[in-house]
Image: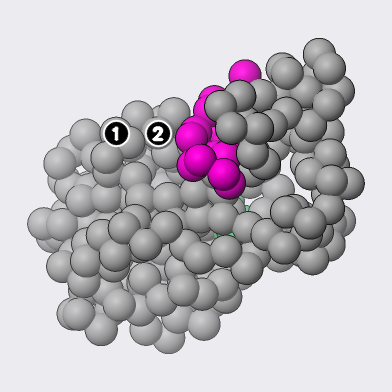
Amino acid sequence: MTDQIQELAQLVTESERTVVFTGAGVSTESGIPDFRSPGGIWSRYDPEDFTIQRFVSSPAARRAFWQMSSEGGLLADAEPNSAHYAIAELHRSGKLDCVITQNIDNLHQKAGVPDDRVFELHGNMQRVVCLGCRSRFPMPEMVQKFQVGLDIPDCPGCRGILKPDAVLFGEALPVVTLREATRRAQRCDLCIVIGSALVVYPAAYVPAYAREAGARLAIVNLTPTPLDHEAVVCIQGKAGEVMPRVLERVK
Ligand code: APR
């Protein structure tokens, strides 16, 4: 693996404009389970309960969400791990164009990547959005309302349904974010995929767009992905161990 780490460090050194594409695997070492590994979220919860249709039509589904949130079950106190910090270091070195992430945990920003350099294709759990008037509110404020009254909080402005500002199954991805992320992927010269199974679309198209536009592709993932054969370097290892070792070797 050391040679592969040196090879990825060399790709970063040569890069003028690196895009990092992350999935849940970059946050597992922060204590947040991913979705498809053994013991992952979809082995314990039914994805059907996380569709927009179910959330809007079923007060029980909404109550379950607020209950899970109030138990801190949604990333409330997670901290960045060494992979997030290595990516933030890439930003400080001037090499990083942006992070395009499927994650909703805000950990890239917490590690020091500026908000305007993080494109969250699946939204962010730090906020809730009103389905009526589209107002947004901080998640902790609404969780506190639920904890005090144990009623499902609704929009303080229009009494509409409040939904996590994360993309639920059956919802469209944020169009402006997806368009800008795609544009960035198509003009980078290196795309590093970290911690994603690359099986959920349209997000998983992003690294393929980079590759098709001529960027070199690198993958750091514990298990094989459908794009491994397109990667210049493919490291099967833990992001929190690999990425700091790569950054140490970047000149
Ligand atoms: N280091 C590197 N890779 C890891 C680590 C780690 N510490 N931990 C897990 N992985 C790898 C797993 O092997 C897996 O291939 O990360 C990948 C995570 O894949 P998924 O669980 O499918 O997560 P992700 O690709 O982000 O899923 C995409 O699916 O359910 C939806 O909206 C959800 O955003 C999510 C989307």
**Percent x, y for residue 166?**
56, 48
Q: Nearer the viewer, residue 92 or 247?
A: 92
Q: Is residue 152 left or right of residue 234?
A: right
Instruction: Work out how far the residue at label 2 is from the one at label 1, CA to CA, in angstroms.
Output: 6 Å
Q: Nearer the viewer, residue 151 or 9?
A: 151
Q: Look at label 2 and name its amino acid.
A: Gln
**Percent x, y for residue 202?**
46, 73
Q: Look at label 1 and name its amino acid.
A: Pro
Residue at the (29%, 34%) spot, across then down: 114
Say if mark 2 contacts mark 1, CB within 8 Å.
yes
Q: State ligand 1's quadrant.
A: bottom right
**Label 2 or label 1, whichever comes before in sequence order:** 2
Q: Nearer the viewer, residue 183 or 195?
A: 183
**Percent x, y for residue 18?**
22, 57
The answer, for residue 127, to whether it is visible in the render is yes
Q: Is residue 168 above or below residue 247?
A: below
Q: Is residue 199 above or below residue 43?
A: below
Check disc 2 and report the residue beneath it: 109
Check disc 1 and report the residue beneath it: 114
Region in magenta: 125-141
Q: Is residue 95 above or below residue 14?
A: above
Residue at the (88%, 46%) spot, across then down: 60
What colour scheme was applied to this rendering of the protein? one colour
Callout 1: helix, strand or loop?
Answer: loop
- Can you tell which quarter of the image residue 251 is in? top left
Residue at the (86%, 23%) spot, across then down: 150
For ligand 1, tell me if the residue under mark 2 lies within 8 Å.
no
**Percent x, y for residue 201?**
51, 75
